[in-house]
Every structure is written in structure tokens, then in C-alpha cells.
Image: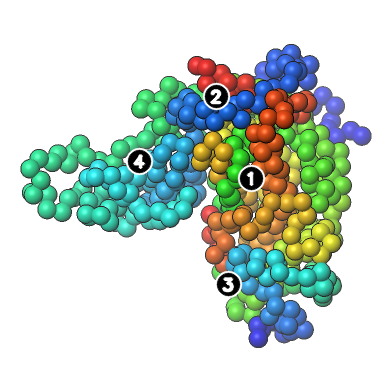
């Protein structure tokens, strides 16, 4: 169970499915998601996005407690997944694109909350 | 619609007016005829490129902010020069470049397992794992185990072999020539002046992607050198891009530049929220005032980014938050691995997030842009296959593709020099 700050506790099931710290981990989840997965994620998080960002804006990257970091990881997964619902008709791959598996993120194994991503 | 105040130009922009070209003068200087694709198709060109371009030109290999501390190093594998290059910040703070080759018998001093390797030289020394020869971060050979067992060994002549290295605006360049024909400043010339002064070093949050493309490096370079493709190939990730204009053409010796203007696109609801967070902020939002004076000199509000080609293989898209929300600039580099294989590197640079919400918003913009790059790279292997097939002999180039026309001409001049 991935715990979230109490105002966002109703998103914990989604966090268990999507919230991961690194781009590599999030990619693996996104690349195997279905149209329904993207739609469910989008419809549940978008209405709360303003309050999620409002909460995260109170925290520096290196000053998040565990639950806030989980919320950060959920928001990050949403930031990367939303275009698949909004722009790509729920497809896990970008239409008419190069293989995403061949694209190597140099920061792929680093937590996206790392202060210094160089 | 008036996008800039009539006739107003930024102070200092006139120093660059000699670079500017109308479409008529671009057509007259570079011609309008189709351009031969032989240099892309012919595998024998690669040996000439290695010698006459990559062996002679200044090449960007790192940035100051990648190796900020004393002892920080980066090793870059450059197949085009059969070289493993160690770029290291010495105890004196100076950045130097060396062949990553132990002067004992040729082993790599820093072992590598990828195109780029980062680390820190503890106590400012690097030790070869083969026999333990120890080099300072200034390249000097410091110690040799069992030194008295060598009949003759002059340590003072056995430092790491140095490569010419210099820095422009925090971008670290090397030159493989024993004696470069020009200094880096001379080589960059007016390009260096046109792009100087932007606080590149403040945008230290980097999201970097790379891939190996089964195509000639110039196919990849040319694909990123024009705005003509945006409404079609990016219809998925950048839908409804309106008012796109690729103009302000500039010829700068071996380099060239141009400007992409645009009125934006149909913004999805999530993008509007993430982008809004960055776009409305003084730290991350559009800062046309940070742009050097020769870029967007009339202060048009629809400025997106400046698109140059820096010969031979580097592009800095300078946006200052005006294009992709919150993005200061992004770069591309194209490294030949062989005639038909290319290492492409794309890096998105942001100013550091001051809180966790800003980082999430940056990751959204980064993802959209990464996806657009996936759309770009989709064409490259097909294009190379098409060129190799012999079905066409030349490229048809329109005005917005002048950077390609110019790069092809510069390429030919270097090969024939």
C-alpha cells in the first residue's frame, strides 16, 4: 500500500498502480497500460490536480516526507500519462513514432525528485 | 495583427544585422536547385568526414554544470575519432581534456560501459586499474608501482595525452587537431557573439535522452534543422500548432541560424495546468529580456525559439521559456558511430525547480517534448533506407530548409579543403 497525505487518501489505489520514483519504472507501467487504465487515471486525478500541485508547491524537493514523495510520484506519473489519454486516444505508444524502448533516458534510474539532475 | 511595435529594435541588435538574410538573398547565395544526397549515401565519405571535419572542427563534449566540482569528470566515447575522451576539472578549477588512455600500455584509465560516464576523481587523482599507474587531474603521471623495475622511465613525459579544450558560455569544446587552425572563439565567430550572454549556466536541471539510429548522422541533423515538418509530423504531440513561421535567416560562416515563431497550439487540459504553473512564473516563464539582443530583435511576443546549426553537429534551441513552457533551451547532438549509425543526444534544460510542483510541471513538459522527439526520430531510419535505395539522387529544399542547404554546402567545402 502506498500511503498518501490524508487529503488524497482516496487516490491510494491509483498510487499503488502508477506512482514510481524513476522514469524507467514509470515507463514500464505506462507502456503496458490500456485505454481504460489511462481513462481511469485521468478521470480520477485531473479534478484534483490543482490541489495536488498546491500541496506539492509547499515542499522543496529535498524536504518531502514519505507520503508527500508518494504524492509527487503519483503526480509525476500523471504528468507523463495524461497525454496518452488527451492526445493519443489511450494508446500506450505515441502514434507514428520511433520505439520508445530504444530511447534511453540518461536520468532513467534516478529518482525524479533528485534535486540535481544534470 | 501587430506582434511587435513597428520599427522598434533592441539595443545592440544592429551589431548582428550583417548576418540577416532575406529569402531572396538566401536563394541567391545558396541557390534554389535540388541538393545532391551523395554525401549521405556514399559510405566512402565517412573516412573523409573523420579526417576533415571531426578531426579539425571544435566539438562540444560537455558543459561546465555537468562537472561543477574539482575532480568531477566525464568520459565521452567518440567512435568518430576512435577516442575515449576524459574531460576533467582539475584542482585549480580548470577543465582539461585528455585521451582516456594509460600511457603504460594503452588501457582506459577510467573504465566505461556506455557512451558517457561520470565520476569524481578522489584526491584529484585517477588510477589505472590495470597496473595502478596514477595520474593527476592535470594529466601528469604521479606514480608508478615498482617504478625502479623499469630500466628507463621518464614520468615527466608520460602524462595523459592532452586534447585541445576550451569553453564557450559554459559549453566545453574539444578539438582533435594537434594544433587547431582556429581558437574556439574564432571558430564560433559571430555565432558565439549572437548566442552569448544568455544565462545558460542557470538552467542546470537536465533531462537527457539518447538513442542509436541506423542512419547517417546528417539525416538526423537535417531532420532537426527545419520547422517545415512541425504541423505534419507533430500533429499528435503538438496538435493544431498555429501561426508557425520559420524566419529571420542568418548566415554565420560555417554556422547558420533562424527563428521559429508561433502562436501556440491546442492545449490539452492537463498541459494547461502544468504549463500555466511555469508560464506565469517569473523564474520559469517567458523571459524575452534574457535573450541576447540579436535574437528576436523586435521583441515579438510569438517568439518560440532560435534554431541554429553549429557546424558540424550541434544545435542549441534557445527558447528562454518562450517556447515549451518553462524550458530555457534544449540541445541536439549527432555523433557518427559509422557511416550508417548515429548516436543522437537530446537534452532539455530547465532552471531548477524551487518546489516539488514545479518539478512535476517540468516533467510534463519534458514528456511532451520527448514524445515529439519520438515523432521526429521515426522518420530517420526510413529516410536513410530511402536514400540508400537509389530511388532519388537529390533533396528538394524549400526556403525553411535553408539550414540544410547551408550545412550541405559547408560539409562539401570542408571535404574539398
The answer to whether residue B193 is above or below residue A29 is above
Task: Write down the residue under mark 1.
Answer: B330
Q: Which of marks 3 and 2 is in front?
A: 2
Give the residue number, with chain letter if any, for mark 2: B189
CA separation, marks 1 and 3? Answer: 28 Å
Real-space CA distance between mark 3 and mark 2, rounded to the nearest whole angstrom: 45 Å
Q: Mark 4 points at which residue?
A: B98
Q: Residues within 10 Å of mark 1 (few under 14, many from 20)?
A: many
Residue appearing at x 85%, y 27% in the figure: B6
Chain at numbered mark 1: B
Instruction: Nearest to the eye among marks 1 and 3: give it.
Output: 1
Question: Hey, which residue is sitting farthest right in the picture?
Answer: B1
* Distance between mark 4 and mark 2 Cα atoms: 25 Å
Sequence-first disc among 1 and 2: 2
Structural distance between the alpha carbons of marks 4 and 1:
27 Å
| Residues at marks 4 and 3, CA–CA distance in whole angstroms | 39 Å
Asked if marks 4 and 1 fall on the same chain, the answer is yes
Q: Mark 3 lies on which chain?
A: A
The answer to which of marks 4 and 1 sits earlier in the sequence is 4
Comparing labels 4 and 2, the label whose residue is closer to the camera: 4
Residue B162 is drawn in which quadrant?
Answer: top left
Amino acid at each position: 500500500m502506498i500511503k498518501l497525505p490524508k487529503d488524497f487518501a482516496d487516490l491510494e489505489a491509483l498510487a499503488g498502480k502508477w506512482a514510481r520514483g524513476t522514469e524507467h519504472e514509470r515507463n514500464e507501467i505506462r507502456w503496458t497500460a490500456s485505454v481504460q487504465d489511462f481513462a481511469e487515471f485521468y478521470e480520477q486525478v485531473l479534478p484534483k490536480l490543482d490541489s495536488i500541485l498546491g500541496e506539492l508547491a509547499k515542499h522543496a524537493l529535498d524536504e518531502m516526507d514519505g507520503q508527500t514523495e508518494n504524492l509527487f510520484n503519483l503526480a509525476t506519473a500523471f504528468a507523463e500519462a495524461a497525454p496518452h489519454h488527451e492526445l493519443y486516444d489511450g494508446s500506450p505508444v505515441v502514434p507514428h513514432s520511433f520505439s520508445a524502448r530504444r530511447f534511453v533516458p540518461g536520468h532513467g534510474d534516478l529518482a525524479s525528485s533528485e534535486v540535481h539532475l544534470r | 495583427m501587430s506582434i511587435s511595435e513597428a520599427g522598434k529594435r533592441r539595443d545592440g541588435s544592429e551589431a548582428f544585422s550583417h548576418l540577416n538574410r532575406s529569402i531572396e538573398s538566401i536563394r541567391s547565395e545558396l541557390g534554389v536547385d535540388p541538393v545532391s544526397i551523395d554525401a549521405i549515401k556514399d559510405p566512402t565519405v565517412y573516412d573523409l568526414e573523420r579526417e576533415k571535419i571531426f578531426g579539425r572542427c571544435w566539438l562540444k563534449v560537455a558543459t561546465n554544470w555537468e562537472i561543477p566540482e574539482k575532480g568531477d569528470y566525464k568520459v565521452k566515447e567518440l567512435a568518430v575519432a576512435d577516442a575515449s575522451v576524459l574531460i576533467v576539472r582539475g584542482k585549480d578549477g580548470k577543465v582539461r581534456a585528455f585521451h582516456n588512455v594509460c600511457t603504460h600500455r594503452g588501457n582506459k584509465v577510467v573504465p566505461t560501459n556506455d557512451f558517457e560516464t561520470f565520476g569524481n576523481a578522489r584526491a584529484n587523482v585517477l588510477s589505472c586499474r590495470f597496473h595502478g599507474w596514477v595520474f593527476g587531474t592535470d594529466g601528469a603521471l604521479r606514480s608508478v608501482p615498482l617504478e625502479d623495475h623499469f630500466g628507463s622511465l621518464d614520468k615527466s613525459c608520460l602524462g595523459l595525452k592532452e586534447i585541445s579544450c576550451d569553453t564557450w558560455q559554459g559549453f566545453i569544446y574539444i578539438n582533435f587537431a594537434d594544433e587547431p587552425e582556429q581558437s574556439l572563439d574564432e571558430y564560433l565567430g559571430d555565432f558565439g557573439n549572437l548566442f552569448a550572454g544568455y544565462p545558460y549556466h542557470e538552467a542546470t536541471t537536465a533531462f537527457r535522452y539518447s538513442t542509436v539510429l541506423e542512419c547517417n548522422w546528417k539525416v538526423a541533423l537535417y531532420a532537426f534543422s527545419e520547422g517545415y515538418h512541425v504541423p505534419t509530423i507533430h500533429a499528435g504531440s503538438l496538435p493544431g500548432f498555429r501561426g508557425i513561421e520559420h524566419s529571420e535567416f542568418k548566415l554565420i560562416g560555417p554556422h547558420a541560424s533562424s527563428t521559429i515563431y508561433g502562436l501556440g497550439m491546442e492545449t490539452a487540459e492537463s498541459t494547461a495546468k502544468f504549463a500555466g504553473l511555469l508560464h506565469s512564473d517569473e523564474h520559469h516563464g517567458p523571459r524575452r529580456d534574457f535573450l541576447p539582443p540579436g535574437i528576436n530583435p523586435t521583441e515579438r511576443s510569438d517568439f518560440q525559439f532560435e534554431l541554429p546549426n553549429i557546424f558540424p553537429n550541434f544545435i542549441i534551441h534557445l527558447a528562454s521559456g518562450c517556447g515549451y513552457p518553462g524550458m530555457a533551451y534544449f540541445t541536439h547532438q549527432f555523433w557518427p558511430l559509422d557511416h550508417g549509425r548515429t548516436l543522437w543526444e537530446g537534452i532539455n534544460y530547465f532552471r531548477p525547480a524551487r518546489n516539488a510542483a514545479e518539478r512535476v510541471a517540468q516533467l510534463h513538459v519534458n514528456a511532451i517534448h520527448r514524445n515529439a522527439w519520438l515523432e521526429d526520430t521515426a522518420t530517420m531510419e526510413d529516410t536513410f533506407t530511402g536514400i540508400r535505395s537509389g530511388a532519388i539522387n537529390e533533396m528538394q529544399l524549400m526556403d525553411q530548409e535553408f539550414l540544410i542547404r547551408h550545412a550541405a554546402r559547408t560539409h562539401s567545402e570542408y571535404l574539398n579543403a
